Image: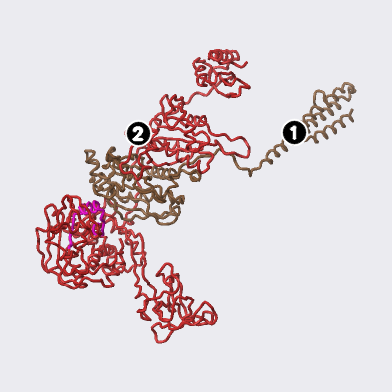
Chain colours: A red, B brown
Amino acid sequence: MKISLGWLREYVDCRLPLAELEALLRRAGLEVAGVEERGLAIANVVVAEILESVQHPNADRLSVCKVDDGSAHPRQIVCGAKNYKVGDKVPLALPGAVLPGDFKIKSGKLRGVESEGMMCSAKELRLAEDAQGLLILPPAAKPGTPLTELFPAETILELEITPNRSDWLSHVGVAREIAVFTGNTVTPPRPALPASTTRVPGLLADGADKSTCYTLRKISGVKVGPSPQWLVDRLASVGLRSINNVVDVTNFVLFELGQPLHAFDAAKLSGSLRVRSSVEGETFEALDGKSHPLPAGSLVIADESGPVALAGVMGGESTSVTESTTEIVLESAFFDPSRVRRAARATGLFSDSSYRFERGVDPEGVFMASARATELILQLAGGTASEDLQTAGEIPARQQITLSPDRVRSLLGLEISDSEIEAALARVGLGCVGSSAWEIPGYRRELHRPVDLIEEVARVAGLENVPSRTQGIFAPGSEADAAYDFAMGLRRTLAGGGFHEARTATLLSGVEAGPFGDSVALRNPLGDDQSRLRNSLFPGLFAALRRNIDQGSKSIALFEIGRVFASEGESERLALVATGDLQAADWRGEPVRSRDIFDLLGVVQNLANAETRPLPNPPAPFGVAVEILVDGKSIGTAGQLHPAAARELGATAPVLAAVFDLVVWRPLATRQTKVSPLAKFPGSTRDIAFTAPLSLPYGDVRAAIISLQEPLLESIHLFDLFTDARGEKIPSDKKSLALTLGFRSPDRTLTAEEVQAATDRIKATLRGQPGLEFRE
Amino acid sequence: MQDQVESLRNEALAIVSAATDQSALEAARVRFLGKNGAVTALSEGMRHVPKEDRPAMGKLLNDLRSTVTTALEEAQSRILEQADTAALSELDLTLPGTARARGSLHPLTQLLDRAVQSFRRMGFAIADGPDIETEWHCFDALNTPADHPARNDQDTFYLPDGRLLRSHTSSVQIRVMENTPPPVRIIAPGSAYRRDEVDATHLAQFTQMEGLYVAEHVTLGDLKGTLEFFFRELFGSGTEIQFRPHFFPFTEPSYEIDIRAEALGGEWMELAGCGMVDPAVFEAVCKRRGDRVYDPGRVSGFAFGFGLERLAMMVSRIPDIRMLVENDLRFLKQF
């Protein structure tokens, strides 16, 4: 919303420094989003006519001019510009002028020649961003005229209006607010109201009468033509271009009082006007020249031929005021905000009128705005106004609200006396009607509850006067707190382990979600690529992986903790992806190894203190995978992508991934540790080494040893695994394994004999595995 | 024999002092003090020494042995010291360290966690709600008119069944009051969604922190004190904070909070919305609960909310909001 300061000053004294005015408006709740300075506000710059121009005796690029500055004697000016000719009118900064950039103009010698001022370019006066040469003024400009008269200074404020304050959508409305905070008086226009009003019940059809107040006034003998400069300037200041004097007046009053008006060409109306609901299949040709189909039930102004205006939104092309119009019917009305909003939405027509009606205009201002526009039309276009105003519908009665001063004090936490509260409310324009009862004027109809008045008191009193209080109840921790802490713990552990936290988008494409089962679709996505809610964290992480591979990263380890969505509900997941070098190469020259699945298994087993069990049928996106188990319950899956899938991501090393269901995992992870006693007696170890068929899983070997339930066996540690594809050291279908077996008793030091006996029993069992042979 | 002792002592001391490493020293020890060493051999000669001279000769020999022993010990520590010194002086401490690469927490997580910890110090607990919300929780209960523009298909994502992706975390306020009687003192960090085309300053999905405190006698002064404390904790005690009257359907009075802090680049920035919970919100909750524990005549409360992306961008001078979701390691590794 553009507000011109010059225009505003017609209604209220606001001669404050701009920064103070901005601060005052902010305090009121009016955010100043921008300030635009137009025109010129520099003293001692006048129109000058160039009388002669000769070459400077000592400088090739300079000229010496004689100019007429309106005084009795010509003035001598040295000038560097070339774009003028003798007889041109140009701006002349006289000695004493201060140009933008604090550039003070003085008399002095330039290369030995006296110069008594400076002729200026548009840029030097900040009338344009960029301009070469002198600003050539219209030939009609009279020498000596202050340039501020040719370019009147104007300050335009761009205000952000909150949707509750439709009264601020006009200059008088903003003036009223400034008066609240400065204590100055507002002087809105006071046009003479028509001598009489006639109620015309037929004006409103059934179904159109609710919340509508409608007025029409006839003005005959008008002469439609161009608007005077002051009106053109006013409209330009708020970004409107002039159309003709009648239409301009309606727009002027809209921005002055906030009341939308419409002028019909009476000659183009067939029969009398009626406000009614549109019927099925009706169309309306608006001022935009297009025909709009109307949804049944839209509020329209219609004559006998059909709709001539969409109520509160836009007038029609066929009845608009043109140069040939001599008789007009001026509409000033109040319409139901939600009906206007629906109509604007349905037709896609949005106007300064609909913008205001949607937010609610002052129903009490309907008559006043009609009178104001009539007064201006008569003044600018001549003619005679009907002494009578046709009206229909009711102006809603003013509401009364009772406010307890104690409630004000207790909600604001502010010591404020009853009389201060009363003063504050009176200042915002409410009328006191008995003890603590307040009457709400039409322009503040959004005030309808006691709390709304409390807000007004707070606004006037200023929040800076409310003492800050730092206290509160004790709050018990919640499940969400526990979940937050659990997730943060995982984040920190993973970050310490070399993983970088990623955040990927929740919205993805159907193609991305496809491999992970059903997903929830949006009804109104921004595009196909964001049409579904993620059912897995992997698509986002794989995209991140690919991005980093493309960018040349040799080692990538990412994780994300976030929500996934299914038709049954939402759940929290942790996912990891990693590929490439385990470590950066360093100056020791040790070989750098790529991460493999066992690096991931180590991370997963440590992170969750979990066991892993191979999955015979790996789920998407894995080529091989294990189930992650805590206390026998599955909390997730880890594995390696199928090499083809890895290649598709551009990876040259195995791509590893894991996913955990935090909702299942958390209750299993938060048990209290119970300490085991520390060993009092030394243990013993024995190494065993054997070859076995390649097809025998290590897990089977380990399970066979454990199944023996050797009471002294404390640990099994695989310390070597060797295969030889060429069959030179061991056959190519065999592998060699070496284990360290750890033995310990809690109550004595073991003898060599009992350790050997236990080892022998283990070896005997292992010999039972087909194809397993000890290397003795 | 006295001469022999003297010359052996000189020979031994010369050899020991010339030794420059451990093995030379060991050779010297064996040569003089070993089982077949020179000092031992000389001791054998005591048998031929006249009886009366034996004590004196014995003393000479003992002196010799202890002199050589002491010299060996001294040489031993000299050599060790030299080796230790050499071992340290050879280290080139300008070589780069070789730690395993560490990972990082996302900048939004880091900022969010600072905020969470600050509110926890003030006694706020965390609350949670679904991203997929009902229109009632996201709009109706929050006193948003049925034809409010925010409910548009243009602004809010909908599911075919009429539910939506919450356009603000304020829906969690309703979830909490629905399920917990007062007093409540919660913060709710989470995702929110708006149908914005993605550009340098907009994402369709963003992160918000919501807060709600409802109890008896909660005042605007509590709101002010809480948020002033919070923003000064986060951005330093010199942080300037202004509450500017504003409008939200679910609070009355409502304010926007403008902040100026060195940590945020020293410019005023609009940072958060807040206000006293609107009585209509309490009424909606009462109606849903079927009781009057949130009767606006009995309890009052404040609520606030702010976005984290823009804050993180200011704090870390991130030029483009999309960097927060691109997960480029060159970016992430800086945190």
Residue A13 belongs to magenta span: no
At 82% from the left and 28% from the top, the residue drawn is: B32
Vertical order, A518 against A147 (above or below):
above
Q: Nearer the viewer, mark 2 or mark 1?
A: 2
Q: Can residue A593 be seen in this view?
A: yes
Name which residue type carries label 1: Gln
Q: Give the range drawn in magenta.
A: A331-354
Q: Nearer the viewer, residue A409 or A229?
A: A229
- Whole-angstrom CA distance, mark 2 to mark 1, is 78 Å
Q: In which quarter of the image is residue A308?
A: bottom left
Seen as rendered, the residue at the extreme bottom is: A72
Q: In this view, does A612 lie to the left or right of B176?
A: right
The residue that mark 1 highlights is B76
At 9% from the left and 58% from the top, the residue drawn is: A201
Name which residue type carries label 2: Asp
Q: Which quadrant, please, contains the N terminus of chain A? A: bottom left
Q: Is residue A214 left or right of residue A659?
A: left
At 39% from the left and 37% from the top, the residue drawn is: A511
Q: Position of residue A234 (x, y in %)?
A: 29, 68
Q: Is mark 2 on a helix, strand or loop?
A: loop
Q: Is mark 1 on a helix, strand or loop?
A: helix
Residue A336 belongs to magenta span: yes
Q: Where is residue B237 in the image (x, y as percent from the top left)?
A: 43, 52
Q: Mark 1, residues whose alpha carbon is within 10 Å: few (<14), some, or many (≥20)? A: many
Q: Which of A333 and A498 is in front in this view?
A: A333
The residue that mark 2 highlights is A518
User: Which subunit holds the residue at mark 1?
Assistant: B
Q: Can residue B129 be seen in this view?
A: no
Q: Which quadrant, please, contains the C terminus of chain A? A: top right
